[in-house]
Amino acid sequence: MQIEQYGVDTIPDEERTSRPRDIVSFLLGSNLALGVVIFGWLPVSFGLGFWPSVTSLLLGTLVGTFLVAPLALVSLRTATNLSTSSGAQFGVRGRLIGSVIGLLLSLGYSALTLWVGGEAMVASLGRLVGMPETGTGYAVIYALLAGCTAFAAIYGYRLLLRISRVLAIGMTLLLIVGIFAYAPDFTTAAPEGSEYLLGGFWPTWALSTVAAGLSGPIAFILLLGDYTRYISPGRHSSRKVWLATCVGLVVGLSIPQLFGTFTALAVGAYEDYAGPLVAGAPFWFLVPLLLAASAGSIGNAGLMLYSMGLDLDAIMPRTTRTKATYAVAVISTAMVFFGHFVWNAQDAMTSFVLLLTAVGTPWAVIVLMGYIRCRGEYDSEALQVLNRRAHGGAYWYRAGWNPRATVAWTVGSAVGLFAVDTPLYTGPLVEPLGGLDFSFLLSAAVTAVLFLIASRERPAGATPAPAPATPTAEEAPAAV
């Protein structure tokens, strides 16, 4: 096992030895973690009972999968990650929009995973060995989880794949055992004293569909390419890759989220999840719960941290993937401490996923439309211009930016932010729309229409190339 040497450069075909089923291993193994389970608690914390929670989670997951799964095919064709691949539509410099979105998405979700896992570990150790729930105890556990996560992310793709394969089996067994552990206290009714977060059933149910259901697949809009860039299109068809991605997203997200809903109602978790989850567990289940909190968190946060390292590598071509991963590991750990000691966890988490969904969805729409228009044909060398600190090529557009895609994304994101409804911020369009959060639908529709109109003169990405990519005057091309 060696540290992965590739950053966001093109993966040689002889190194692309993964299979479609590896996507399922990643999406199932990494998502069977408390950081994903907690999204099943969100509908309950909003005041919903079992069946409204289940329907909102499943609908959001299916709709999100329908939008997100085709993105896996982009990196299958380009052999690089999705933010770099988006240069075909946004320009080789405009692709930095995707890198920043991916960095923020992975940063938030990795911090959330470590925060929830650390909370459950401290509470479990408290019941098992009497470990006090002090700030020092939390700091030690968070640092331990962060260190293990950074180790896995730095070693890279191969180690993360092995971890995911083990977790896909081990965590599934733990969750099955957990159903029997919490079943005696399960009820379909919302916790006593709970109220609809937005004042009424339908607005709250719609919020749950977006914040808890749809946000799961949306979190992967830039992560899927990290897996499929290691699959060769010459050996595996696009159809198999797409099907594997759909199965991985639906199964990998639904199982932990529904487990979260089940356990939240069983222990009456309304204002908090990790504490009541541990407090309501039978003593014999504390060791399995401790394993789930630690191993699952490392697997999930490891993939997020790995993706963050790639995104920062894309933003700063002078660095390496390894150095970039070290840097984002420090930032992610700091976010964990803020999440525990400073923020209101539920409000911060809900607002975070809704706001990033509003700006991430338009980006995904443009990349997918570009893929359809160019029929999956990309100039892989032209996509690497910025990474090699050169200029020119098929995707240079105007100084490395495609104004049409950039404007469509900007307007679509603005509409999404105006229509989003979070516990910390309500957009001005929410009230005229009947108090419902239509940010996802509006941002996607507006972006699609604007980009279609702006790019109808020629296929997205098919711009007149000024000249082959050449180094800048002061620098020669460098390896990423």
Image: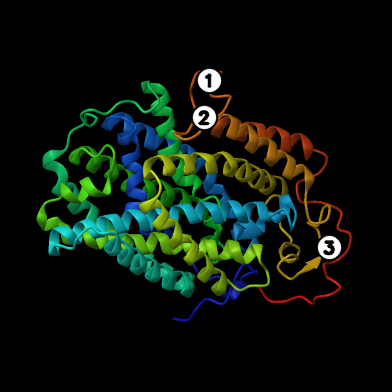
Label 2, label 1: how far apart the Cα atoms are = 9 Å
Q: Amino acid at mark 3?
A: Gly
Query: Residue at the location (42% across, 49% down)?
Result: 247
In the figure, residue 121 lies in which quadrant?
bottom left
Query: Residue at the location (32% across, 53% down)?
Result: 34
- Is there a contact, CB below 8 Å, between mark 3 and mark 2? no
Query: Residue at the location (67% across, 56% down)?
Result: 96
Q: Amino acid at mark 2?
A: Thr
Q: Residue furthest bottom?
A: 2
Residue 392 disc label: 3
Q: Is residue 156 left or right of residue 472?
A: left
Q: Nearer the viewer, mark 3 or mark 2?
A: 2
Q: Is residue 299 left or right of residue 405?
A: left
Q: Nearer the viewer, mark 3 or mark 1?
A: 1
- Is there a contact, CB below 8 Å, between mark 2 and mark 1? yes
Q: Amino acid at mark 1?
A: Glu
